[in-house]
């Protein structure tokens, strides 16, 4: 399995600079747990529900995916 890239500082700024195809399959799978796909990532369709959720409203699977992507509650909630 491919590694998830190390994200330092604000994870949103790191991920926002990437196209869907810039991510490896492991990273794409984590974003898919959060409801994203290539179309929503590229802003061709609306973002998934998780995009508007506070940390406490995420499912355990969504929280785990977010953690692996470099998010912690304060960073997620300030989005």
Image: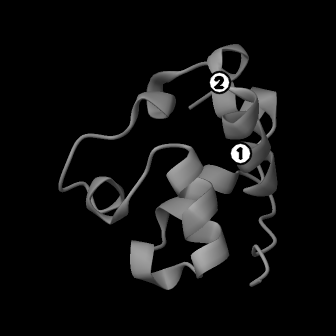
The residue singled out by tag 2 in the image is 58
The answer to whether residue 19 is seen in the rendering is no
At which x and y percent is residue 30?
A: 63, 57
Secondary structure of residue under mark 2:
loop
Q: Which residue is drawn at 63% across and 69% down?
A: 27
Height in image: 61 above or below 41? Answer: above
At which x and y percent is residue 68?
A: 79, 55
Label 2 with label 1: CB-CB less than 8 Å: yes
At which x and y percent is residue 38?
A: 34, 65
The answer to whether residue 29 is seen in the rendering is yes
Height in image: 15 above or below 46? Answer: below
Q: Which residue is drawn at 58% across and 78% down?
A: 25
Q: Which residue is drawn at 48% across and 73% down?
A: 18
At which x and y percent is residue 19?
A: 41, 74
Height in image: 53 above or below 3? Answer: above
Q: Please state, as top left, top right, bottom left or bottom right, where the C terminus lies in the image.
A: top right
Q: Which residue is drawn at 34% across and 40% down?
A: 47
Q: Which mark is residue 27?
A: none
Relative to 72, 21 lies left or right: left
Q: Please state, as top left, top right, bottom left or bottom right, where the N terminus lies in the image.
A: bottom right
Quick one: label 2 or label 1, which is nearer the N terminus? 2
Give the CA separation, mark 2 to mark 1.
9 Å
Secondary structure of residue under mark 1:
helix
Question: Which corner quadrant of the image does residue 13 belong to?
Answer: bottom right
Q: Which of 78 and 47 is in front in this view?
A: 47
Q: Which mark is residue 66?
A: 1
């Amino acid at each position: 399995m491919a590694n998830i890239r190390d994200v330092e500082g604000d994870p949103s700024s790191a991920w926002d600079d990437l196209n869907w195809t810039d991510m490896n399959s492991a990273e794409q799978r984590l974003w898919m747990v959060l409801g994203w796909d290539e179309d929503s990532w590229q802003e061709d369709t609306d973002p998934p529900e998780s995009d508007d959720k506070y940390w406490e409203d995420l499912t355990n699977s969504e929280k785990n995916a977010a953690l692996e992507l470099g998010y912690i509650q304060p960073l997620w909630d300030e989005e």
